[in-house]
Amino acid sequence: MKQLALLGASGHGKVIADAALLSSWKSVTFFDDIWPAARWNGHWAVEGNTATLLARLANFDGVIVAIGNCKTRWEKQQFLQAAGANIARVIHPAAIVSAYASIGAGSVIMAGAVVNVDAVLGNACIVNTGATVDHDCKLANSVHISPGAHLSGNVQVGDCSWIGVGAAVRQGVVIGDHVMVGAGAVVVKPVANGMTVVGSPAMPLARR
């Protein structure tokens, strides 16, 4: 039996759990550091905190960090990997992922998402519901492509950057590390590290 542990009893975690059970995983178990204050995440029990998960790692075939915040997700994944966790991937059966794309450990691809040929996703990435990552895109570690966001071909996105709901990025654009692209933004030129950009065309709002 393939058993998956999820660290992060969140709404995002529920979506991952549902995708996992619709694919090759037979069971999911949640852990969260707010336990025991929270003992349920929707349909699934929360069975302990990070320490509990570490003590039970041998019981699971894989682990996913189910936390939306990019920086926190990456820190937690590195911690678990150093502790010996087998970091898994989850791809919803209704996603379309090219056989020639590369998906890093801890990454999740949600329903209706498309990841096209020669796209490369780093570790701990999220391609959320209905988002698209076109040919030859390069996503670094812990990038989050939000629902309905679209990356044209040859886009590069740096570590821990977040592309907001419904945003669009023109082909060939380079987005730096720790960038926030606002919901519905249209990115047509490079975005430097640490910037927040909003609007159409996207313009800097403030440094994070």
Image (cartoon, helix red, strand yellow):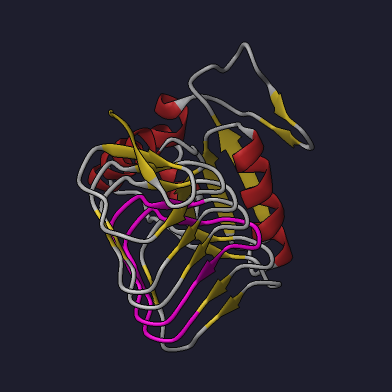
Q: Predominant secondary structure in magenta?
A: loop
Left-right relation of 75 to 52: left
Instruction: Locate residue 55: give its quadrant.
Output: top left
- What residue span does the magenta drawing correspond to? 116-145
Image quadrant containing the C terminus: top left
Identify the residue at the far front of this view.
201
Residue in view at x 42 percent, y 28 percent: 50
The correct choice, above or below, for 197 with respect to 148 in the image is above
Q: Position of residue 146 (x, y in %)?
A: 54, 50
Q: Position of residue 193 (x, y in %)?
A: 20, 44
Identify the residue at the far right of this view.
43
Identify the residue at the far top of this view.
37
The correct choice, above or below, for 9 with respect to 103 in the image is above
Left-right relation of 167 to 85: right
Give the camera-side residue of 91 and 143.
143
The correct choice, above or below, for 130 with respect to 48 in the image is below
Residue in view at x 50 percent, y 85 percent: 98
Q: Position of residue 204 (x, y in %)?
A: 32, 38
Q: Position of residue 54 (x, y in %)?
A: 39, 35
Give the camera-side residue of 17 and 26.
17
Is residue 130 on the magenta stretch?
Answer: yes
Left-right relation of 177 to 19: left
The correct choice, above or below, for 40 with respect to 76 in the image is above
Residue in view at x 61 percent, y 41 percent: 12
Instruction: Locate residue 48: give its quadrant.
Output: top right
Image quadrant containing the N terminus: bottom right
Is residue 76 on the magenta stretch?
Answer: no
